[in-house]
Amino acid sequence: MSKIPYRFYLNEDQIPKQWYNVRADMPEQPDPLLNPETGKPLSTQDLYPIFCEELAKQEMDETTRYFDIPDEIQEFYRIFRPSPLIRAYNLEKELGTPAKIYYKFEGNNTSGSHKLNSAVAQAYYAKKQGLTSLTTETGAGQWGTALAMACSYYKLPLTVYMVKVSYEQKPYRKGVMETLGTNIIPSPSNTTNVGRAILESNPDTTGSLGCAISEAVEAAVTTDGCRYVLGSVLNQVLLHQSIIGLETKKAMEILGEYPDIIIGCAGGGSNLGGLISPFMQDKLTGKANPYFIAVEPASCPSLTRGKYAYDFCDTGKVTPLAKMYTLGGDFIPSANHAGGLRYHGMSPILSKLYHDGHLDEARAVEQSSVFEAATIFSRCETILPAPESAHAIRAAIDEALKCKESGEEKTILFGLTGTGYFDMSAYMNFTSGNMSDYVPTDEELQVGFNGLPTVGNS
Ligand SMILES: *Cc1c(COP(=O)(O)O)cnc(C)c1O
């Protein structure tokens, strides 16, 4: 037996009791949210009709370095955290690499993803404020499931606008949310003005995350005691997800390790932001210099081919404007895209870190190579990864193979965000040789860029 265990768990005394806010250590801040009509920066109070107050404050706070995690949230975290840091001995052996590969596994809860870390926090603050219901959107369904779990725990009624194509293709996800007591509406729907308008102009649309966000926001601001919550992209979500990186850093410290390369998949940026934040602190303060890689689908390439510009966070143009890498709110990935990570934009914090060169690299990968990596991984490590997570696995395998070539014994860390049991039709397409790749052309991307607002971008 090696000294470093296969699975390592922090004990009670070692578990982080605070979240870390990376903005406090950034040399330059992300650009502020703008009011789309006036072009003026928003104040914290401007966000109160959309978000509950505590979360609006977290959203706007650039200076508080550490936030105490309330006891009630820590108690909920104890149900499914700490998550294990796993040494991928079998994968290393399979690849024949001298690299050491570690991954932080966040899939050990029914949502099958890291999203519960923020769902619990958002439901808790809403309950504490005395709100009586919440709305949100979900694409693949992990966020909707995570929030459904948190809302059932706090007895808060929840309505989820579920992207229509997922609603139809993932009936079991829907079934899980219904079991947890959630009201689910396929989006676009005729329950909102923005949904009706989208249906009118495009009756056959299968929906998009941006469109479901518009509907959920409209429902929240027009219902008494109701607010909207979002599972990624926002600063507050990255703050809550810092628990991933804080646990990882502590665990590696105890094991006497430090990563040379840190890899995460990037959809809206929450798991990557959460994983890298405490390591980014080391980089920004000159303590260490790990190499950060964000991995995204070639079919939804916001960091590698998007524009760094102000854009709406939704399709219906009801949200504030955020400065981020974006493909434009009208962008919808091609129909054969199976791997999740389909949001048009990227966390403003990560966008800024990438723009300023602190996040070292963004890499786009095609889905058949992602599923190939997922298959190799599942056979070595006994976990069936979510397709989203498998983007990170792809890059980790590629980095480990580079080490094999060069003989370098690098320490590679990646985030394994979740499990893929609800993605079996995609897995089966891959296994039977029926998976195809699609990379949008520059002309196709231009359509999305043409829809970017002029406010903030002139
Ligand atoms: C939602 C999700 C992602 C992508 O979201 P980020 O905000 O970019 O982290 C990745 N993996 C899983 C399993 C997810 O559910």
Image (spheres, rainbow, N blue to C red):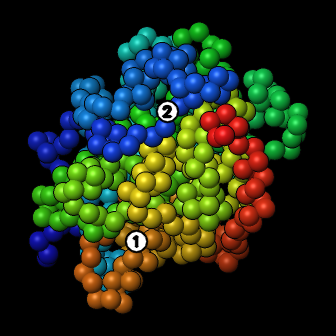
In the displayed structure, would residue 63 be above or below residue 391? above
In front here: 392 or 82? 392
In terms of sequence position, does the residue under pointer 2 or pointer 1 come before the other?
Answer: 2
Residue drawn at 55 percent across, 57 percent down: 303
Mark seen at residue 396: 1
Report the label total: 2
Amino acid at circle 1: Ala
Judge whether 66 appears above or below 411 on screen. above
Q: Which residue is mark 2?
A: 32
| Residue at the limit of the structure toward the front, as seen here | 458
Nearer to us in this view, 166 or 207: 207
In the image, 277: left or right of 437?
A: left
Q: Are marks 2 and 1 in contact (CB under 8 Å)?
A: no
- Between 402 and 231, the residue placed more toward the observer is 402
- The image position of residue 245, as x and y in percent, is 29, 50
Q: Nearer the viewer, residue 303 or 340?
A: 303
Q: Quadrant of the N terminus?
A: bottom left
Residue 33 percent coordinates (x, y)? 53, 31
> Judging from the image, what secondary structure is the residue with disc 2 in?
loop
| Residue beneath the point at 46% across and 60% down | 294
Can residue 450 be seen in this snapshot?
yes
User: CA–CA distance between discs 2 and 1?
Assistant: 34 Å
Q: Secondary structure at mark 1?
A: helix
